[in-house]
Amino acid sequence: MRGDGFLYRDPRSPYWWASWSVGGTRYRKSTGERQERKARAWLREAIIDSRVSGAPAKGSKSLTVGRLLELRRKEYQRKGNKSIDTLDTLLKIVLAEFKGERRALDLTTKRLEAFFDDLLEKYSQSTVRQVSLHLSGAFAEAVRRGEFSQKDLPHVRKISEPKNARLRAPSREELAAFTAVAPIWLSDFVWFAFFSGWRSGEIKGLTWSDYDSDKVIHLQDSKSGKPRILPLAGALLDIVERRRAEKVRPMAGGKAHIFSRNASGAPLGDIRKAWERNLRASGVERFTPHDIRRSAARFRRQTQGIDSERVQRMFGWSSGKMLTRYNIVDTENLRAVLDSDCIESPEVSDSCQTETPE
């Protein structure tokens, strides 16, 4: 970074500070990072931004809505958050109302109050809450980077989480009714989610290169950032082997996705439209792919009586420092549990047992 900028410590601050020059003007700002490696990444990004769009503003007047939201996105990327696609969807809701070239100063408290009133009529309370949180985060990042003044911050309404939010856990009977009228790719997706307890994004990202000859799936890119393995048996093995038999694999070999709508091996992508159609056709009360994860946990803990430690490892949940040492799963032990799984529909699996083993 010699010639571009440098990092230094301020004894009054716990963070690394950065200094760099653009157009003959030197800037000094807190990186907001405690680790030198992350602070250097912040400095590189700041220098690139400065060269592309000019020096960062010393006040609030030149910050646009587009730049404001881009700061939030870059913060997400820098922290390695996995839900960047969801963030983009939420930021588009803001851009639909406030065009990107408008000044961030135009997002006054009064304007934002009217904006959230309109959103609550169009979207669920949970969605509006996420928009509020990300907009607040965008302003906070702009202030941290010196591109918006603290005194100009508008009040961003705090939306409470809906009562009884995240409590839906469809039963196995409901899942059976849902999958009975679903295309085979969606049925496989649902039952794999139920018996594995994995997140929908993790399942969508699985390729044939993640499945080895020992019938074990290796998840390298999880939300927690830690790799996981899943030994297949019972219904899970049925699902994957059937997809292999149906040649749901790509011409591109191992890069093909295990869960695809057809034999091309292309990723599933957005399944919301197909999901809503299937809900209407099945008559099942509305639930989301994420709700299946709750059903799976309930099944493993309450029905099968599996201890919480193994469930947390299987689902990829973190439970404090006590579980950080469990990076290796006892595959044979877990395979014995999975071997008792069966899908409610006989058309999908013929390995079901009528009773759950003790």
Image: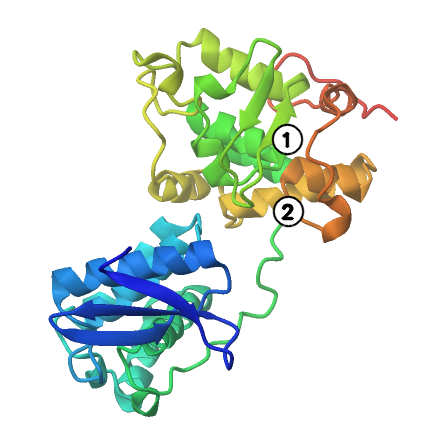
| Along the line of sight, the residue nearer the viewer: 72 or 292 | 72
Q: Residues within 10 Å of mark 2 (few under 14, many from 20)?
A: some
Mark 2 falls on what kind of element? helix
Mark 2 sits on what residue?
Answer: 294
Q: Residue at x 34, y 43 (%)?
A: 273
Residue at disc 1, secondary structure: helix
Of marks 1 and 2, which one's residue comes earlier in the chain?
A: 1
Look at the image and tell me whether residue 37 can be seen. Answer: yes
Question: Residue drawn 32% across and 68% down?
Answer: 122
Q: From the viewer's perspective, is residue 68 above or below residue 323?
A: below
Residue 181 seen in render: no
Q: Quadrant of the N terminus?
A: bottom left
Outermost residue to the front: 2
**Which label sits on residue 102?**
none
Kindly identify the residue that appears in the image at 37 percent across and 44 percent down: 272
Q: Badge 1 is on which residue?
A: 195
Is 144 on the left or on the right of 214, as rendered? left
Give amino acid for label 1.
Answer: Phe
- Color theme of the render: rainbow
Asked if 304 appears above or below 134 in the picture, the reply is above
Identify whether 264 is placed above or below 344.
Answer: above
- Residue type for callout 2: Arg
Tell me residue 8's x, y (percent): 41, 69
Q: From the viewer's perspective, tell me whether residue 185 is left or right of residue 72.
A: right
